[in-house]
Amino acid sequence: MNGFLEYVPGDSFLHHMNPVAKLAAAFLLVIACFATSSFVVLALVIALDAFLALRCNMVRQTLGLARAVAAFSLLLALIAILFTPKGAVLVALPWGYIGTESIVAAVRIVVRLVACAVPLFLVFYVTKLTDMANAMCKVLHVPYKYAFTFTSTVRFIPVFMNDMAAIMEAQTARGVEFDGSFARKVRLMVPLCVPLLVSSVRKTNSAAIAAEVRGFNLRTRESGYKEYPLGGIDAAAVAASVVAVALGIAANVVGLL
């Protein structure tokens, strides 16, 4: 079973798209989500997310991601409810009040973050990081050092998560119980950041040495042998994302709910 942000092989059209086109379409969908306040547009983006997840055979991973993002966004939603007094008064507070529009704004935050997070994460699940770095160099002419830095950051996220899980399992074997309240879990996990930091520095140093041995400093845009041409499906995906941005802006202008 693949872990968090690890490539999942497949034969969907999203797997065969140009990596740059995937990134461009995903970022445009993010812009569309933040450029609109319409629940209709956000619902359309979520429907598109569901369609993409179904085509990539990644429904389980997408649902897990949506739950995690929704749980995280609840904190932002709570802040919006407590400190954004709008609409008819529902509950009076010492520093303001909770209004009907406050509830709507909170729900909009949760829906917006879920809608915009899924396309970005799907791109990383269906694209090899080496292809992403090489395509950024070939198509966008990004210096390889910057592309490598970006992809290495993404690559190390699951590595650090696995290291943290291993450290917690070792502590559990020594009798540490991580069950209980959220505050207790945080208090027990803070000391574990030290061995995680040491392990991270060691892995980063080893990766840097390995890259230098393989001639990293000599790498240029022409060093990669694989080409990444843009096809019709790439143009269609980017065009559809541009339409989503325009639709989101237009929905704000006409006041579509």
Image (spheres, rainbow, N blue to C red):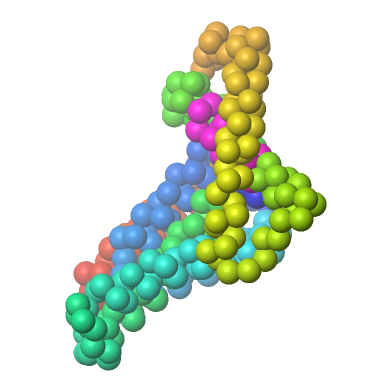
- Left or right of 75, for residue 11: right
User: Can residue 155 be seen?
Assistant: no
Image position, residue 57 (x, y; %)? 71, 59
Q: Quadrant of residue 218?
A: top right
Q: Quadrant of residue 228?
A: top right
Q: Does the magenta stretch include residue 173?
A: no
User: Can residue 180 be seen?
Assistant: yes
- Left or right of 245, for residue 70: right
For image coordinates 61% across by 38% down, the residue present is: 196
Quarter holding the C terminus is bottom left
Q: Could you tell me what secondary structure mostly forms the magenta stretch? A: helix
| Whether residue 205 is situated above or below residue 19 in the rendered picture | above
Q: Is residue 155 magenta?
A: yes
Q: Which of 157 and 179 is in front in this view?
A: 179
Image position, residue 136 (x, y; %)? 50, 30
- Left or right of 99, for residue 22: right
For image coordinates 76% across by 55% down, the residue present is: 175
Q: Which of 131 and 90 is in front in this view?
A: 90
Image position, residue 114 (x, y; %)? 48, 64
* Magenta range: 148-161
The residue sitting at the front extreme is: 175
Q: How many labels does the image show?
A: 0
Image position, residue 102 (x, y; %)? 29, 79
| Whether residue 108 is situated above or below residue 174 in the rendered picture | below
| Whether residue 15 is situated above or below residue 185 in the rendered picture | above
For image coordinates 65% across by 11% down, the residue present is: 214
For image coordinates 53% across by 26% down, the residue present is: 148
Q: Which of 241 and 97 is in front in this view?
A: 97
